[in-house]
């Protein structure tokens, strides 16, 4: 997954206060691009997580932990909201022990 909108606090538009979860943690939102496996189409979703979130910037690969989709309907409108327990920067891939294509092996053959 890719961060497309950096994390920011989720603010109650009526009161201007930062929203809190049931454990009284501030709620932050981050925009994440997701692609369905086997499909070229990509969607951006807004994921709510306990915050604050640090170390995440636009364009960075991220890992979303315990992602849950919640269908809702209010006043004739409906949609899906997304919640996770954490969003973390993706760890860099470990260095491969396999030599690049065309490289000679230690034995001199390649």
Image: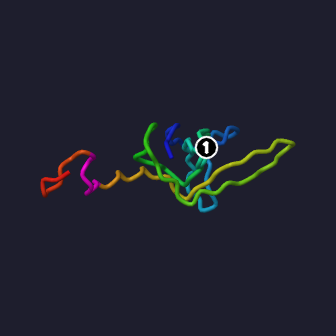
Residue 85 coordinates in the image, percent (x, y): 55, 59
Residue 110 coordinates in the image, percent (x, y): 20, 51
- Determine whether, in the image, residue 99 is placed left or right of residue 21: left
Residue at the image point whose x is 52% and y is 37% from the top: 4
- Determine whether, in the image, residue 74 is placed left or right of residue 100: right
Residue at the image point whose x is 42% and y is 51% from the top: 90
Where are the magenta residues, as a range? Answer: 95-101
Residue 36 coordinates in the image, percent (x, y): 61, 47
Vertical position of residue 22 compared to residue 81: above or below: below
Residue at the image point whose x is 67% and y is 54% from the top: 69
In the foreground, 22 or 16: 22
Other residues around mark 1 within 10 Å, as few (<14) / some (14–19) / many (≥20)? few
Vertical position of residue 23 compared to residue 29: above or below: below
Helix, strand or loop at disc 1?
loop
| Residue designated by label 1 | 39
Residue at the image point whose x is 57% and y is 60% from the top: 66
Q: Residue furthest right?
A: 76
In the foreground, 19 or 36: 36
In the foreground, 28 or 68: 68
* Residue 96 belongs to magenta span: yes
């Amino acid at each position: 997954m890719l961060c497309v909108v950096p994390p920011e606090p989720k603010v109650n538009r009526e009161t201007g206060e930062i929203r809190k979860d049931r454990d009284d943690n501030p709620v932050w939102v981050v925009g994440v691009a997701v692609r369905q496996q086997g499909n070229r189409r990509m969607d951006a979703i807004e994921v709510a997580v306990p915050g604050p979130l640090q170390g995440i910037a636009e364009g960075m690969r991220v890992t979303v932990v315990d992602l849950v989709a919640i269908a809702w309907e209010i006043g004739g409108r409906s949609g899906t909201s997304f919640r996770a327990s954490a969003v973390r920067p993706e760890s860099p891939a470990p260095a491969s022990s396999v030599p690049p294509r065309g490289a000679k092996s230690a034995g001199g053959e390649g």
